[in-house]
Image: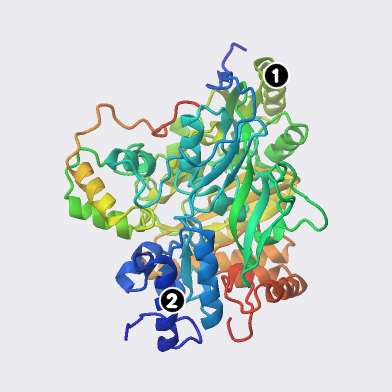
Amino acid sequence: MSRRWALSAGCAAAVGIAVLLGAARSPAQSAGEWRGPQHLWDALCAYCHGAGVSLQLLGAQLPAPLIAEVTRRGLKAMPPFAPTQISDAELAALAEWVSRSEPPLRPATGVSANGDGR
Amino acid sequence: MERFAVLPPGVSAGEFARAVAEFRACVGAGHVYVTPEQLVPWTQVMLPFEDEAFAPAGVVSPASVEELQRLLAVCNRYRVPVWPVSTGRNFGYGSALPATRGQVILDLKRLNRILEVDPVLCTALVEPGVTYQQLHDYLREHNIPLWLDFPAPGPLASPMGNTLERGGGQTPYGDHFGNCCGMEVLLGDGTLLRTGLGGIAGTRSWQAYKYGFGPYLDGIFTQSNFGIVTKLGLWLMPAPPAHLTFLAMWPDREAVARAVETIRPLRYDGTIGNFGVLVNDALLMTSFHRRAEVYTGTGAISDAAVRAVAAPRGIEPWCYLFSLYGRPELIELNTRIVTTAFEASGARLIAGVHDPMSINELTLQAFSLLNWIGSGGLAWFAPVAPCTGADVAKQNRLARAIMDAHGMDFFSGATFNGREVLNVMPLVFNRDDADERRRARACFEELLTRFAAEGYGFYRTGIGFMDRVAELHGATLLDVNRRIKRALDPNGILAPGKSGIHPLPGRT
């Protein structure tokens, strides 16, 4: 068989001594801690709405209040997102960002949004 | 006085108002939710029950263990039951909702610190609200070559929540409880316990050695209501040098027993590195089609309808997705071994398949399943079989007959860990249709009864079915669980009804 196995990216990175890494630099992901709408989109929305699991919302020009309401309340198969996870202000900014977004340059591939093979 | 739509059982409106006021004093008014409108984001029911069955009385969200301790003191004083959730993404098992009406959901999302990652020992220590996404991002940003093992709702779910439910994934670390090490647990009476070696001041071994000294307690805090786990140690997988994912496909519907007999020795001797999943063609088709495109007849979907869309895609009736991990030369050797074994069983083997969950790539692709009908109705029927072909084939025949009788489509996704097969069968139904909801529930209940009558138990179940499943596993087990419950949570305030464990007379 030819070499069809995949090398794991990052496996060769050397880790010499024990370094206990604390929480100081950790990107927390609860209400009030998101870096902005893009961060929220990539971490929560794109796995379905940018990966072929559900409707592509980027460029769909849906009204921001509708996006915010469905995100908060859920709709059929879509789970709701509570204010402990996304604050009201973050949700409003996300909904506005999605509503005004351009269509993606490439169609959804079905590959996870941040997958780099690791 | 503040009005509440739902009250905890046995608690008056006045008492609950005072408890809520004290909750607000503990965590701040902005982290206490009690109006019906505020509670909507926690109340999605995917299971075949009415929405009202599990209606919570409120939600409280602490940001520290100290706040949590103060909240529990209030709950003990007023006898207010609380249902802890890490992120509440237990889709198809109850999501964030409590097993009984009138509990206060304790949303632990704000307890979200990654307390420690040790890249040499390959361990982590996390709080309940940390998601797999957050931990994944953390490892990437720090260039730490460790893999995570995700359950199906990976990016949204938490290692804590899924491990405590004894969930699984698709890398060699797929047994999540088997790969946790050390817990900090807040008991109902306010005691803060560290299991394993966590009670030794200054220890660096808490996440290195699971069993500690004396009885090994961690298991009693899984699928349980004996305490609130506030910190959890995890073992993480060193990124393997290489990996290769395969799909083995059998061309006949009777191949299940042969498939299991082929897989078992390859799992037992370590050739196949992960659980893998043995799925029927109908389940695979949910990734590509909606039910209405495939079948418009009455009753459960027919095999012919499934074959009509599966065959053109080259999908056979039974498919086993699995992976090899390790050094390249080992993968080349093991590729020859699995090829010989699967081909001898009549399977065709495709190498180089991309399965994100098997290789540390976050995904929600598995929930394409919900597009099949589109209403969000989902209940996982999850029987355990001994790892023999005869047992798995028998379970599938039995389930298929019951599901056919109730007009429910038969999906099967069986995983292979130790000596068992977790033969998970999702019931996907139209939750918007009252008749279909009733049929799904009746189907699930008949599946439980008839599988138990054949001697089969269950790996996990959703709210609404917990009392019945606990009953089926024997009165003595349930009685002992209730005695432990009484000892650790004397007022019975923690998650009454979880796994059928109801603490106090009259609170069932």
Could you classify mark 1 by the number of other residues whose Cα lies within 10 Å: few (under 14), some (14-19), or many (20 or more)? some
Q: Which residue is mark 2?
A: B22
Q: Is residue B102 visible?
A: yes
Residue at x-position 47% and y-position 68%: B105
| Mark 1 chain | B
Above or below residue B69? Residue B166 is above
Give the amino acid at mark 2. Glu
Q: Is residue B284 visible?
A: no
Q: Position of residue B109 (x, y in %)?
A: 45, 55
Above or below residue B328? Residue B90 is below
Q: Which residue is mark 1?
A: B330
Residue at x-position 61% and y-position 50%: B232
Q: Position of residue B99 (x, y in %)?
A: 53, 70
- The circle on residue A80 is none
For the residues labelled 2 and 1, the Cα–Cα distance comes to: 61 Å
Q: Describe the element under mark 1 as helix, strand or loop.
A: helix
Could you classify mark 2 by the number of other residues whose Cα lies within 10 Å: few (under 14), some (14-19), or many (20 or more)? some
Is B46 situated left or right of A32 in this image? Answer: right
Q: What is the tally of numbered marks visible in this picture?
A: 2
Q: Describe the element under mark 2 as helix, strand or loop.
A: helix
Sequence-wise, the earlier of marks 2 and 1 is: 2
Q: Residue furthest front?
A: B202
Which is closer to the viewer, label 2 or label 1? 2
Above or below residue A100? Residue B243 is above
- Give the quarter of the image for residue B26: bottom left
Q: Residue furthest right?
A: B214
